[in-house]
Image (cartoon, rainbow, N blue to C red):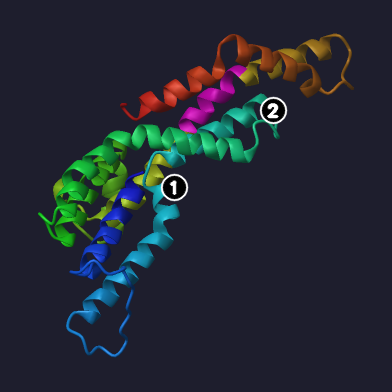
Amino acid sequence: MWVVLLLGVWLAGSAHAQQPATTAAPALSINLGGSEQGSVATAIQIVAMMTLLTLAPSILMLMTSFTRIVIVLGFVRSAIGVQGAPSNQILVGMSLFLTFFIMAPIGKRIHDDAIQPYMVKAITTEVALDRASAPLRSFMVKQTRAAEIDFFLGLSGRGPTKIEEVPINVIAPAFVVSELRTAFQMGFLVFIPFLIIDFLVASTLMSMGMMMMPPVMISLPFKLLLFVLVDGWHLVVRSLVESFGV
């Protein structure tokens, strides 16, 4: 959602820059000769907008809550032992909707602080982008471990730096690594109860002399029953949402 809002800043800027003074139908004119004043700046803005559109999927996946959510949901499916249910499309779609839900307050701040003032021409494009990136930066810093930020500061050759002065190119990779670590920790906790069921089933079959019987065939119904009885999806989704402080 916040990615769409950021793109809206660029689209609105292009629309205001090209809106005619009369009531004639709008038209798009691209001048490559450079004879008109400001054509170079307009071309740079268009290139930047297209670049942002290209990077939007990566930004949505790596700079929001999407990474943690989709990894944990994948661990849940693997722990139960059903590789085809739910399908990848369902997991990704569920992760996207949960991401929109978690990032909604950040999107509202971007809309109120950046989009609305920019639409009424109260601020410039540069100021709008700075205001739009501030809530996202605050979100990533809140979810990132200090050790990860220090690690990437060291890799970049920087010394001790105040958190307000840490550049976004350091915060972004630190946030991704921190999210991967958190997701794997949550995945480990998800595996424990299902692993216990596998151990119990395997031990029972061995004690009964049924060593040729695959334990997975017996344990899968019990794992599904356990997951349904404890309302597993509710617990997983609630844990994911609360892990972001929502």
Q: Which residues are magenta?
A: 184-193
Q: Which mark is residue 81?
A: 2
Quadrant for the N terminus, please. Answer: top left
- Residue 182 in view of the camera: no
- Where residue 25 sits, quadrant-wise, is bottom left
Left or right: residue 138 versus residue 188 is left
Amino acid found under the numbered disc labelled 2: Gly
Q: Residue furthest front?
A: 23
Residue 17 in the image: state x and y as whole percent. 21, 68
Residue 75 in the magenta stretch? The answer is: no
Comes first in the chain, label 1 or label 2: 1
Observer-nearest residue: 101 or 26? 26
Quadrant for the C terminus, please. Answer: top left
Q: Residue furthest left?
A: 122
Label 2 crowding class (10 Å Cα cut-off): few <14, some 14-19, many 20+?
some
Q: Viewer-nearest of labels 1 and 2? A: 1
Amino acid found under the numbered disc labelled 1: Met
Q: Please, is residue 19 above or below residue 133 in the view?
A: below
Q: Please, is residue 117 above or below residue 14 in the view?
A: above
The residue depicted at 35 percent of the width and 50 percent of the height is 4
Label 1 crowding class (10 Å Cα cut-off): few <14, some 14-19, many 20+?
some
Residue 152 in the image: state x and y as whole percent. 30, 53
The residue depicted at 30 percent of the width and 84 percent of the height is 31
Is the stretch drawn in magenta largely helix, strand or loop?
helix
Task: Name the residue carrying label 1.
Answer: 61
Left or right: residue 154 versus residue 69 is left
